[in-house]
Amino acid sequence: MANIKQQKKRVRIQARQRLENLRYRSTIKTLTKRLEVAASDGDAERIATEHRELVRTIDRAATRGALHRNTAARKKSQASKIAAGAPS
């Protein structure tokens, strides 16, 4: 347990940052599932919209440090394969 004032503050900040990173990762999973559903329905306009939103969120998460940049690149590649209709 932290017993120095600055340590207690860092614990609070890290807890807040951990929750924010979790929100990013969870949102990316949700958007990926939405993209898969759109791809299975075959709606081209919806696929483009979902893919654009997913890539934007992945880039934002990588910039903020919630995802490693290689992980972000891999997820974007998987998303483009789904959007193109290739089996994953």
Image: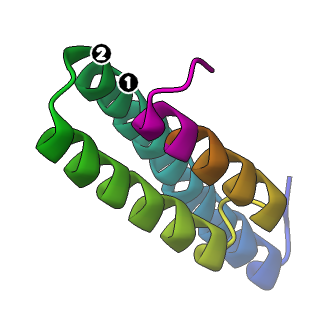
Pointer 1 with pointer 2, Cβ within 8 A: yes
Q: Give residue 69's position: percent from left, percent from top.
A: 77, 66
Q: Nearer the viewer, residue 88 or 65?
A: 88
Q: Nearer the viewer, residue 30 or 42?
A: 42
- Look at the numbered disc 2 and give the secondary structure of its residue: helix
* 23 sits left or right of 21 in the view: left
Mark 1, residue position:
36
Q: Nearer the viewer, residue 72 or 10?
A: 72
Q: Quadrant of residue 47?
A: top left
Q: Nearer the viewer, mark 1 or mark 2?
A: 2
Identify whether 68 is placed above or below 39. Answer: below
Mark 2, residue position:
40
Q: Residue furthest bottom?
A: 6
Which contiguous range is marked in magenta?
Answer: 80-88
Colour scheme shown:
rainbow
What amino acid is found at the position of numbered circle 1 in the picture?
Glu
* Magenta-colored stretch includes residue 82: yes
Identify whether 4 is placed above or below 48. Answer: below
- Look at the numbered disc 1 and give the secondary structure of its residue: helix
* 87 sits left or right of 30 in the view: right
Q: Quadrant of residue 86?
A: top right
Identify whether 51 is placed above or below 64. Answer: above
Q: Give residue 18's position: percent from left, percent from top.
A: 62, 55
